[in-house]
Image (spheres, rainbow, N blue to C red):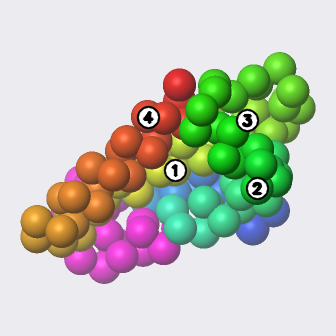
Amino acid sequence: MTPYSNVSMYHSLGHSVFLYLEAMLTFEQQSIINASKALKHSLAVCNRYRKKNTLGESIGKMVKKTNFDQYTEEEAHAELCHAECLLLKSMLTFMEDETLSSFIKAGLKIRSCYNSYK
C-alpha cells in the first residue's frame, strides 16, 4: 500500500489504518508519531479529491444541510475517507498527549468528524 499512498486515497487510508493499529496496540511513542504523520498525509490526499467549495457555499453549510446529490461518486468517497481519517486522528490525539488541551482538541476533532458523517 505504501507505493500508492501518495496518489490513492484508499491506499493512503489503508496504510494509515495499519500504522494506527500498530500504535494503539504497542503504545510506543515512535509508533504513535508515525501513525500521526501518516494520518496527516492521508488527510492531505483526501483533501485533493474532496469537493472544492466557494466562500458562499462554506457559509451556507452552517445554515443548511449539505446536498450530497450534487457530489460525484469520487467526492462522496473522499468525504467519507476524510471523516474516517479525522476520527482516527482524534483518537490518536488522546494517546499522544494527556493534557487538558489535547482532550479539548480531540473532542473538537470528534465533533468535526461527526458533522462530516451527518
Q: Do the residues labelled 3 and 4 touch (CB within 8 Å)?
A: no
The answer for how far apart the CA atoms under marks 1 and 2 are is: 24 Å
Per the image, the residue denoted by label 3 is 77
- Residues drawn in magenta: 21-38
> Which amino acid does the dot numbered 3 rest on?
His
Q: Distance between the residues labelled 3 and 2?
A: 22 Å
Q: Which of marks 1 and 2 is nearer the N terminus?
A: 2
Q: What element carries label 4?
A: helix
Which of disc 4 and disc 3 is earlier in sequence? 3
The CA span between labels 2 and 4 is 22 Å
- Marks 1 and 4, how far apart at CA: 12 Å
Q: Dot 1, crowdedness within 10 Å: few (<14), some or many (≥20)?
A: many
Residue 8, position as x, y percentages in the image? 78, 55
Foreground residue among 68 and 14? 68
Q: Which of marks 3 and 2 is nearer the N terminus?
A: 2
- As drawn, which residue projects farthest toward the top? 69
Relative to 39, residue 34 above or below:
below
Residue 38 image position (x, y, % from top left): 52, 68
Magenta-colored stretch includes residue 25: yes
Q: Which of marks 2 and 4 is in front?
A: 2
User: Earlier along the polypeptide chain: callout 2 or callout 4?
Assistant: 2
Disc on res. 67? none
* Marks 1, 4: nearer the viewer: 4
Residue 65 visible somewhere in the drawing: yes
Which residue is denoted by mark 1 in the rendering? 85
Magenta stretch contains residue 33: yes
Q: Which residue is drawn at 58% across and 38% down?
A: 62
Q: Residue 114 carries which label?
A: 4
**Lower position in the chain sequence, tag 3 or tag 1:** 3
